[in-house]
């Protein structure tokens, strides 16, 4: 360190030497931080096609808090879901089409499309069960006939690698676009006309 305090060295030479020393010490640390950040932000893709990352899941058209809790429980217990956080809840009985629930989900070892299928299959299992009571977070919830019908009407709607959207199809039945050309046939606005819509 004595060399830096040597009065005979020109100021510019001292400045260059100090700068070189600082770069030598801190550059490896900066590279390490950047590589760590990149591995955190970018989802890892496995050889099987499964991956890990984050995903937004939306549910539109449900106005019942009880059904929202059931859907929340289905998401949390879906294989591959590491963490699920509900970040929006808006239920409007008078305007069901504007009702929105949103979750931010962290997943691992699976794909968004497998998650979509798993969530939908679990919903079908619950709504198709003859028993009217299901367990949600250790609590028994009893569904009436109307609530079971609404649960049956929840279907996948849109799916991307970053977002899954489910809707209560009975509420939107009168204005859902057809998934195929009608070739001169009269237009029929029933969900049954759109088999497996939402899956890619």
Image (spheres, helix red, strand yellow):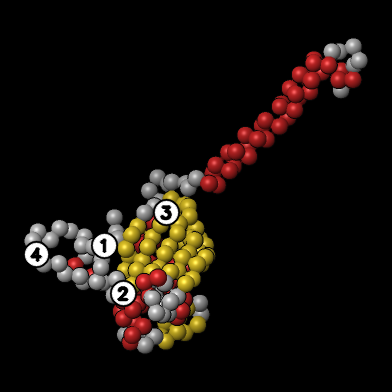
Q: Residue at point 50% right, 58% down? A: 106
Sequence-first disc among 2 and 3? 3
Rounded to the nearest whole Å, what is the CA distance between mark 2 and mark 3?
25 Å
Q: Which mark is residue 162?
A: 3
Image quarter where the N terminus lies is top right
| Crowd tier of the residue under label 2, counting other residues whose Cα lies within 10 Å: few below 14, some 14–19, many 20 or above | some
Residue 47 x/y as whole percent: 40, 45
**Pointer 1: what residue?**
197
Q: Earlier in the sequence, mark 4 or mark 1?
A: 4
Q: Tell me where residue 4 sits by quadrant.
A: top right
Q: Which residue is mark 4?
A: 185
Depth check, mark 4 against mark 1: the one in front is: 4
Q: Residues within 10 Å of mark 1 (few under 14, many from 20)?
A: some
Task: Identify the residue under disc 2.
Answer: 171
Query: Viewer-proximal residue, 50 or 93?
Result: 93
Position of 188 with respect to 171 (left or right) is: left
Tell me the element at label 4. loop
């Amino acid at each position: 360190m004595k060399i830096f305090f040597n009065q005979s060295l020109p100021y510019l030479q001292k400045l260059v030497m100090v700068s070189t020393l600082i770069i030598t010490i801190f550059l490896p640390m900066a590279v390490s931080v950047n590589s760590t950040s990149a591995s955190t932000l970018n989802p890892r893709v496995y050889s099987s096609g499964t991956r890990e990352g984050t995903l937004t899941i939306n549910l539109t058209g449900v106005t019942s808090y009880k059904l929202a809790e059931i859907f929340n429980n289905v998401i949390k217990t879906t294989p591959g879901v590491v963490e699920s956080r509900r970040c929006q809840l808006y239920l409007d009985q008078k305007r069901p089409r504007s009702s929105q629930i949103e979750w931010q989900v962290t997943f691992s070892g699976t794909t968004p499309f497998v998650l979509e299928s798993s969530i939908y299959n679990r919903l079908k299992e619950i709504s198709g069960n003859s028993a009217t009571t299901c367990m949600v977070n250790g609590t028994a919830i009893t569904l009436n006939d109307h609530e079971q019908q609404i649960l049956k009407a929840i279907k996948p709607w849109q799916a991307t690698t970053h977002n899954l959207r489910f809707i209560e199809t009975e509420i939107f039945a009168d204005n859902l676009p057809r998934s195929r050309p009608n070739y001169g046939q009269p237009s029929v606005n029933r969900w049954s006309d759109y088999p497996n819509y939402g899956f890619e």
